[in-house]
Image: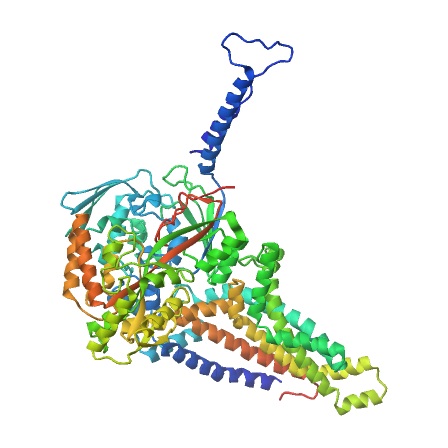
Amino acid sequence: MLRYTIHRTLLMIPTLLGVAVLVFVLLRLMPGDIVQLRFLMEGGQVSPETIAAERARLGLDKAIWWQFYDWMTGIFVGDFGISMWTGRPVAREISSRLELSMQVAIMATVLATTLAIPLGTLAALYKNSWIDRVIQVFAIAGLAVPSFWLGMLIILGLLLNFGWIPPLTFTPIYEDPLKNLSQLIWPALAVGYRYSAVATRMTRSTILEVLQEDYIRTARAKGLYERLVVGRHAMRNAMLPVITVIGLEFAFLIGGLVVTEQVFNLNGIGKLFVDTVTRADYTMVQALVMLVATFFILINFAVDLLYAVFDPRIRYR
Amino acid sequence: MQLASRFELQDSIERKCQAPKTTKKQPVTREKGERPMRLQYSVFAALCAAVALASATADAQTPKRGGILKFAVSAEPPNYDCHAATSFAFIHPVRPHYNTLLKFDEPNYPKVKGDLAQSWTVSPDGLTYTFKLKPNIKFHDGTPMTSADVKASYERISNPTGGAVSIRQAAYSDIGSIETPDAQTVVFKLKARNASMLTNFASPWDCIYSAAKIKADPKFPEKNVLGTGPFKFVEHASGSHWVGERFADYFEKGKPYLDGFRAIFITNAAASVNALQAGEVLAEFRGLSPADRDKLKAALGDKIVVHESPWICSLVVTFNTEKKPFDDVRVRQALSLAIDRWKGAEALSKIALVRHVGGTLRPGYEFAAKEAELVKYPGWGKDINKNRAEAKKLLEQAGIKDLKIKLLNRNVPMPYTPVGIFLIDQWRQIGVTVEHDQPETRAYIANLRGGNYEAGLDFNCDAVDDPNLQLAKFISADKSPINYGRYNDRKLDDLYEKQNRELDNKKRYELIRQFEQHALNEAYSIPIVWWHRIIITWKQIKGWYMSPSHYLNQDLQDVWLDS
């Protein structure tokens, strides 16, 4: 297990390096840069000398490989750089948004798993019954409806019926839990619904598959209660792909709520992503991509380790 | 009016309007000639009602102290330095912390009035501007503001050092020296006359900084907010909001009326309109689309006030004169003649924030062409069939058949996309095929600046009406950083210089007409339509005045909230 953990940890390095090279190059393939945007997007008679001086100040006049070297050496000493747009440390800009994004992701995950596992199991156990049909409709609708659109409907529903919308600025849960929840419960619902739909369908299909296995037939032949057959034998084995889906969805939620965060005006990582890409804030985009990539890798790793917990046949060496 | 005196006035009205006391037992007797008591009461009641009505009207207009103004800002400032800023996203949250030497008289735009300056004089030769500052002005850290701070701030704008960035150096290039004979007096001596100088001194970007702070660190204002303005800086939560609180030692006694303000950054337009509708914010000061206006009006009725004005922003088509066939004036003229600006503006105004037909200057501005003059310019005549016939003839003379153009446009839906589609349709009517290229803003600007385009839907937006600012789009590329047409035209440069030096408004007007006639005849950059600014504020916001610029009237000094 230890050897496996070390091996996987070491594998993270080339993966992240590949991501770093890719994002660094792709960002610079597009014409234009942050200086032109900052000074010229609303007009303004800025002299070419001022633009050149600002580009030099931000290091954009250096050779591309030199810029990459600067960035990499910074990362190795834990310095992700300064945002080209705000002039503040990138780590500070990200950390101020991470709390919100993490909370939405956790709330959506809790909501999704609380709904998906019982519903998916029920649908599998009552395959082709009206229960299965209702759950299937619920799940397919969840997959078909984009979460940002559901978010818009929620906002409009609240606005037109109660003349109220969720708070526009974030209050941490430890400061005012009610205000915090009144802001974040709605995006968590909008995102959690789609998330639960994916997990419900996955749970249903894996349980159906597991229920056909020999060891389930053996358990039933032994005369075990159906509750034990499903709970102890079927569920445990069926959960492996479900955990993978939940893990990947959770990682996606950290930085992927691009449109939903805009709809609810949430100051999270997804909105920051959009803002910084639009502004061509290279240092910020690079740091965000690295952050999300790291999340994906770590969550994948955690999911792999969880496999061993759920399935005793899996042993890492 | 002060709060105390308002209460005193109300109290005195109430006392005067108390009815005279009578007792039932007393017989009602009348002397000869005495008016009956009922009539006396009626007259008295009528007088009281009139006084009460007048008092109520006066009371409704009497500013009230207190409250936090919450408003939406659809973008966020990159840093805190006025001298390096260009965006409304900067002005809306930051301007309430600062003062400028002069500012625009809000209800009487474009008249200027003193902000930090109490009075000023201009020498008859137009070369010396002397400003007397108001007394007892303090920075938010308690230090006094003097003429030395004004001098240091203007030196930083006109000649930045130590890594400071100033993007309006050109506007102050005529300043020869700045003198401070005493702590309350600043004298600007110009090297040459400049007809726009007074307007420049009222620019909302020219914040006055502490001389001591910028001497210690010329880049101090980039990351710190320290002004003399009506509101002190409290907090900037990146990506979320900006907070200011009332500056108790503000030099305008009794002002500001608000306890503070909270600017909330809402980048999504629909979210901003929803926030307005829910009353989570009471205003958005940049501008809304006609559809948003209609939606809010239908939902909120008389709870809101709709303010509308022409906007100092125009959409122009710029042709890359280095690319064929746009080096041929006949082709450019033909493309200008094909556009029905009058009908187009009317139709577009229903779906986009554009409305006005104009030339190089904002319609309605004192130096702008009147309609009778405008219709004489090629492409501005109202007989579109005649214009298009001429356009076709010009293309034929230029030997152009089946012209295909790639129109570079900005991927901003309002108002760029509808105007781009309008142009495609207009040019199609003279047989020109257009490919609509809408990259994101970054690539759009890079392509415009780099000459990587054929025809581009460009914009010309400024903080104030000023020929020097708006006409700079049209002068030679080697003199103007915003000429993307890549041409040099010395006649335009000469006329621009002449109007800049002409202090007689009538003569300046004539020079501007000559400039405009030549620029629109050459059709390097052709104005299409001018923007129309629509602002919605909740009814309780008082003391805010609409202007044709989203960069003006944002110090919030006179704004107050009615209950």
Name above or below for residue B377 compared with residue A258.
Answer: above
Q: Residue furthest bottom?
A: A214
Does residue B492 appear left or right of residue A161 in this picture?
Answer: left
Residue closest to the eye, B356 or B292: B356
Using the rendered image of the protein, determine whether residue B78 is visible from the camera's viewpoint: no
Q: Quadrant of residue B242?
A: bottom left
> Where is residue B291 shown, x and y percent of the image?
46, 60
| Residue at point 61%, 55% (across, down) | A162
Name above or below for residue A177 compared with residue B393.
Answer: above
Image quarter of the C terminus of chain A: bottom right
Q: Residue furthest right?
A: A223
Name above or below for residue A46 compared with residue B501.
Answer: below
> Where is residue A122 shown, x and y percent of the image?
75, 77
Name above or below for residue B209 compared with residue B445.
Answer: above
Residue closest to the eye, B367 or B252: B367
Using the rendered image of the protein, determine whether residue B379 is visible from the camera's viewpoint: yes
Image quarter of the N terminus of chain A: bottom right
Residue closest to the eye, B17 or B463: B17
What count of labels does the image hold? 0
| Residue at point 49%, 31% (across, down) | B53
> Where is residue A136 shown, x and y percent of the image?
69, 78
Coloration of the structure image: rainbow
Q: Quadrant of residue B357?
A: bottom left
> Where is residue B563 shown, x and y percent of the image?
52, 41
